[in-house]
Image (cartoon, helix red, strand yellow):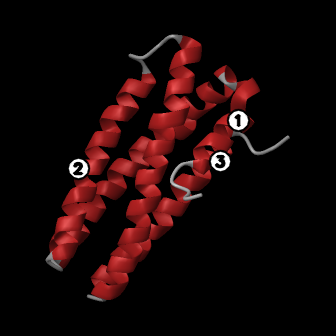
Amino acid sequence: MSKGLTDFLTGEHRHCDELLAEAEIAASKNEWQQVETSFREFYEATTRHLSMEEEVLFPAFEKKTGNTRGPTCVMRSEHREIRNILDDLNEALSTQNCASFLGFADTLNIMLQQHNMKEENILYPMTEQVLFDMQDEIMEAMSRLGVVA
């Protein structure tokens, strides 16, 4: 059997974590060109991941369970908070403000770790159970998001 939803999406989380760490390391060295490159990759990977969940996974889960007020509602709210901090990071990057960039990165890192833990330990296993027969189709649809044909 192919990799399940939890493994697939957890792998996405780890990739994003690595990209944020690269941006933080570069910022701590005042290597702003590298910060720009790493942050752009992190930003694109993270916003794509959020979209994969919001546009494919969550609607499929909600349709199958009939529940739009449960865990997906909480995750969408957290996604809005994550996007707000991404905007703050972008602003700090544009002014090359190391203290602000590292502060926002630290805040985001803490938020992401808590958010990811909820998804990986609660939501993703629930989606695997509920959407078992559709996992491959859902992963394929998520993988196509953001890909230019």
Q: What is the crowding at mark 1: few (fewer than 14 residues within 10 Å), some, or many (at least 20)?
A: few
Find disc 1 in the rendering and name its residue: 137
Residue at image position (55%, 23%) is 61
Furthest residue to the right?
1
Secondary structure of the residue carrying numbered label 2: helix
Residue shown at 47% from the left, 13% from the top: 67
Q: Position of residue 54 (x, y in %)?
A: 45, 36
Q: Amino acid at mark 3?
A: Phe
Q: Which residue is mark 3?
A: 8
Q: For mark 3, give the secondary structure.
A: helix
Q: Quadrant of residue 88?
A: bottom left
- Looking at marks 1 and 3 on the same chain, the residue that comes earlier in the sequence is marked by 3
| Label 1 SS | helix
Residue 137, position in %: x, y? 70, 35
Q: CA distance from mark 1 to mark 3?
A: 13 Å
Q: Nearer the viewer, mark 2 or mark 1?
A: 1
The disc labelled 2 sits on which kind of residue?
Answer: Asn
* Residue at the disc numbered 2: 84
Q: Which amino acid lies under the numbered mark 1 shown in the image of this protein?
A: Glu
Residues at marks 2 and 1, CA–CA distance in whole angstroms: 31 Å
Task: Report which quarter residue 120 is drawn in.
Answer: top right
